[in-house]
Amino acid sequence: MDIVTLIIQAICGGVGGNVTGKLFNKIDLGVVWNSILGIVGGGLGGQILNQLGVPITSLGSSMDIPSLLSNIGSGAVGGGVLMVIVGLIKNMIAKK
């Protein structure tokens, strides 16, 4: 994985974390935390998909259309998922 792929996934993860936070108001952590968790989740999402055998780059290039779309998708979904997990954990701890 190259740095361009990681940057794309991190940016899309930040966007995915913020969109998820705004869609689910009860787990929204604010713009800063949504962005931080989204960036981390975007990078981790791409790494996990790569380890599971889902190709996130084709033919060794990160700049062709299928690779860009898979990087954008994995970053946004990974960022949203991590934001939801942390938001739910925060809510569960706050209820106790």
Image (cartoon, rainbow, N blue to C red):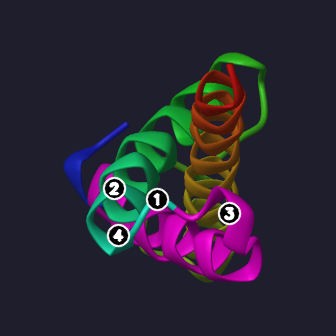
The residue type indicated by label 4 comes to: Ile
* Residue 7 falls inside the magenta stretch: yes
**Quarter where residue 21 is shown:** bottom right
Are the residues flagged by discs 2 and 1 in contact, CB closer than 8 Å? yes
The alpha-carbon separation of the residues under discs 4 and 3 comes to 13 Å
Marks 4 and 3, the one that precedes in the sequence: 4
Residue holding disc 1:
29
Q: Residues within 10 Å of mark 2 (few under 14, many from 20)?
A: some
Which residue is outermost to the left?
A: 3
Pick the residue in front: 45 or 89. Answer: 89
Instruction: Single out the mark in the foreground, 2 or 4.
Output: 2
Element type at mark 1: loop
Which label lies toward us, 3 or 1?
1
Q: Quadrant of residue 19?
A: bottom right
Q: Main secondary structure of the magenta part?
A: helix
Tell which circle, 3 or 1, labels the residue nearer the N-terminal end: 1
Residue 86 vertical placement versus 33 (above, below): above
Question: Which residue occupies 65% across, 28% down?
Answer: 89
| Residue that numbered label 3 is attached to | 70
The boundaries of the magenta stretch are: 5-28
Q: Earlier in the sequence, mark 2 or mark 4?
A: 4
- Which amino acid, mark 2? Trp
Which disc, if any, is residue 11?
A: 4
Seen in the picture, residue 1 relative to 48 is either above or below; the reply is below
Number of the front mark, 3 or 2: 2
Residue occupied by mark 2 = 33
Question: In the image shown, does 47 or 64 lie closer to the viewer?
Answer: 47
N-terminal of the two: label 4 or label 1? 4
Residue 66 part of the magenta-drawn span: no
Q: Position of residue 81 (x, y in %)?
A: 70, 46
Question: Could you tell me how far apart the alpha carbons at marks 3 and 1 are, in whole angstroms?
Answer: 27 Å
Residue 5 relative to residue 20: left or right = left
